[in-house]
Amino acid sequence: MGHGTFQAGELTAVIGDNSEHENHRAGYNGVWSLQHQSGTRSLFVPGIAGLNFEHIVSGEGEENRDIFFEPRKAPMTYRKISDTECELYQPPTPTFHLESWTTFKMSPPHAIDMTFRCRPDQHAFNFGYIGLFWASYINAPADKSIYFRGGLPGQTRPLWSQFCSQMHNRDSTVRGVKDNFQMTFADDTRETLYKSFSPMQFDTSMFYGNFDDHTFAVMLKSDDGLIRLSHSPSGGGGNAERETTNPAWDFQFIIPEYEVNAEYTLQARAIFREKCSRDEILSEWEAWNAAK
């Protein structure tokens, strides 16, 4: 089987590879569904996913849909490690020759820890950098915004900032306050979330959003590259029953310079808990970020 159901603490998650299964659509990997014990529905759009490995970015080939969505298309396998942990393995992909391992581990009472490791097996990134992109398709929340610590350039201190892009691919990516890296792209490539930048900046590599009576937060760290946040108000399509759209709450991992056969790692923690204060979110971040 290409997926499994995991229950730990307050959460029940279905985690799987990019295969099709019943109502789950082919191409979407990661956390197929995530439900809190006090909730009535999955956080993620049914049939799609969250923490979904979506794009490998080289600056070229985006006009080809199979290349643009290579992590969706390339073979991927699921392996259960224990009752609380599993791994998705993707052999070197056809275009970019990027090999990757993603482990998901339930961390009671209300977290999932994700560790992503990758290794470029060939010189397939002609502009010298590797860009990696994850999407979480949120199931028609009343509030489409994400919130993070940061603001506009020139602020004397970070504040809690609300971020909700107006339309898909417009002002959609937020960079860290020290992130000055410029990705190079071939001429006449498509518009994307990761090419369009907001003037806002984040100070802490985490964000949260509101979902029904719950809070969903994503925390990120890596010593190997840059982290960026992205948002789309409609990336997950529409929800006719609720007469609204499904936003995408996304993140990126940028490796400005890479070496063939070197290994690069990104760590993430996704928290899904009953609605809480911002002080509690910061406490969760500080505890996780301080851990080895």
Image: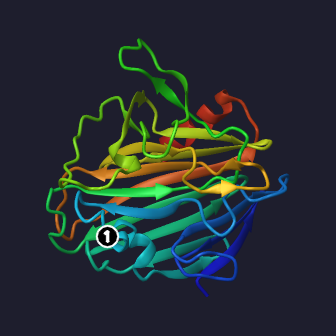
In the image, 223: left or right of 243? left
**Is residue 279 or residue 290 the one in the foreground?**
279
Indicate the position of residue 151 as horizontal and vertical percent values.
Answer: 46, 23
Identity of the residue furthest to the top in this view: 156
Visible residue check, residue 215: yes
Which residue sits at x=42%, y=27%?
Answer: 200
Classify 156 as above or below 282. above
Q: Residues within 10 Å of mark 1 (few under 14, many from 20)?
A: few
Which residue sits at x=62%, y=71%?
Answer: 15
Indicate the position of residue 74 as horizontal and vertical percent values.
Answer: 39, 79
In the image, 166: left or right of 127? right
Classify 223 as above or below 260. above
Check disc 1 and report the residue beneath it. Answer: 64
Which residue sits at x=15%, y=56%?
Answer: 127
Tell me the kind of residue under disc 1. Asn
- The number of callouts visible is 1
**Is residue 108 or residue 186 the one in the foreground?**
186
In the image, 192: left or right of 26? left
In the image, 129: left or right of 213? left
Which residue sits at x=18%, y=69%?
Answer: 124
- Give the quadrant of the N terminus: bottom right
Visible residue check, residue 292: no
**Residue 174, quarter of picture:** top left
Classify 147 as above or below 72. above
**Is residue 153 or residue 177 the one in the foreground?**
153
**Is residue 161 or residue 82 the one in the foreground?**
161
Indicate the position of residue 146 as horizontal and vertical percent values.
Answer: 58, 37
Identity of the residue furthest to the bottom in this view: 1
**Colour scheme used in the picture?**
rainbow
Q: Secondary structure at mark 1?
A: loop
Indicate the position of residue 266 as horizontal and vertical percent values.
Answer: 40, 55
**Residue 276, quarter of picture:** top right
